[in-house]
Image (spheres, helix red, strand yellow):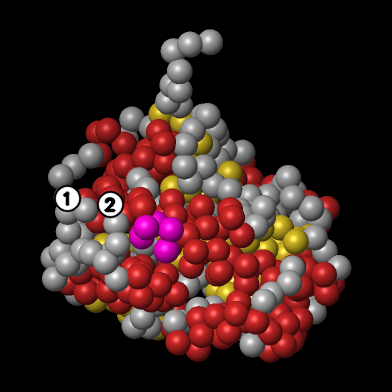
Amino acid sequence: MSYTRREILETLRMTELEHFDVRTVTMGINLLDCGHEDPKEAGRRIYEKMTRLASNLPGIVEETADALGIRVANKRLSITPLALISTRAAPESYVAIALAVDRAAGEMGFDFVGGYTALVHAGATKADEALIASIPEALGTTKRLCSSVNVGESRTGLNMDAVAKISRAIKETAYRTREEGSIGCAKFVVFANAVEDNPFMAGAFHGIGLPEAVVHSGVSGPGVVCQAIRRAGRCDLRELADVIKRAAFKITRVGELIGRQVADKMGVPFGVVDISLAPTPELGDSVGEVLEAMGLERTGACGTTAALAMLTDAVKKGGVMATSAVGGLSGAFIPISEDAVMIKAVKEGALTLEKLEAMTSVCSVGLDMVAVPGDTPESIISGFIADELSIGIINHKTTAVRVIPAYGKKAGEVVSFGGLLGEAPVMELRTLSCEQFVGRGGQMPAPITSLRN
């Protein structure tokens, strides 16, 4: 991939003035050959393989970023869903493995590691059930470990029994990490239609259809898109979409350049570049600000869902023009805690959970980093999850929920996490009972796609 002088100058401007960064370089590692009946031995094998394959990556990422003058915000790992690793099917077994994974990631200098994962969209094994039961302790005793569970697929429907177990795990995780704002819940996501090559946390895992090891890059840049929209001034929607596509094209080119160079130096294949507008708490690095630059008085106004749909589509089209390796989730994230403009909209009452839910039908993921009152019952959390994941199942798109029942907090208060996660306003959640509905359990059938053979 060659760059013109103009492209280099534009990249420097994006980096210095528009908050652009490569949000993550993520290395995926297959651990299927590390299983053992003794969880300590399984943990030892996993630790050895992770450190053998990935120990050079943080240094190579820094070296590559410095040479190109581009910031890389995070170095991350994704591993095979640990419920697939053979060991004794007991919660304490998976906690022991979680500690080994977290220790390996910390010693090598990675920011996060994803893959404490179970795939239960059509039913659960004993290993799946043990891992899900262990999630509160695993997230409460580790620093870098992230967890996910896939409970729904468009081809199989929604596993409501798994949703109920996850709701209990979320409440317990919130309690175990209550001294840190229930931050353990910020490291857990529940999916429908989870993808195998997502480099972003908390939902990253190394899919079983991927190579032994692979390097992905995840690129952000809402500031770049926002400034491009402002420079464009008055133009119609078709022209505005082209402006967004061109900005996404430039971002994607840089992300692929970084990812491919790191992969070459590591001697492993390059996977995908995920071009997702992912905000941070910094001013000027906000998806909400992009939507308002498009012409909304405030995120949450009528027209917000339409603007987000157009933004997501244009970002994907720009990425596809730039590379044949677009993957992951790609589009726009709308996490409440990490976006200063969206937090402001929530505090002003312009953005409600109902509007957020509508927006998730067209964005990359779903209800992300949503803090709710700590005393929210498990059944309401189950209904909250089921509502969101049903959108993804019906529409054949990846959808996720990262919900934080902030222990001891009420609606209108704020819970602070610090760092990249920032702070989140505790949002009011409807308390009308859905217990009889979600309590029915079982499998919600897959949606029909055609009445014709």
| Residue at screen point 65% across, 57% down | 323
Of 267 and 302, nearer the camera is 302
Q: Which mark is residue 358?
A: none
- Left or right: residue 363 versus residue 120 is left
How far apart, in angstroms, are the residues tagged by discs 1 and 2? 25 Å
Percent position of residue 294, x then y: 28, 64
- The percent coordinates of residue 64 (x first, y second) are 73, 82
Residue topped by disc 1: 431
Q: Position of residue 28 (x, y in %)?
A: 71, 61
- Residue type, numbered disc 1: Thr
* Circles 1 and 2 in contact, beta carbons < 8 Å: no
Residue 227 in view of the camera: yes
Question: Can residue 279 be seen here?
Answer: no
Image x and y of residue 388, in percent = 35, 45
Question: For the N terminus, which image quadrant?
Answer: bottom right
User: Which residue is pictured at 29% across the width and 57% down the height?
Assistant: 236
Residue visible at 75% across and 61% down?
Answer: 270
- Part of the protein shown in magenta: 239-243
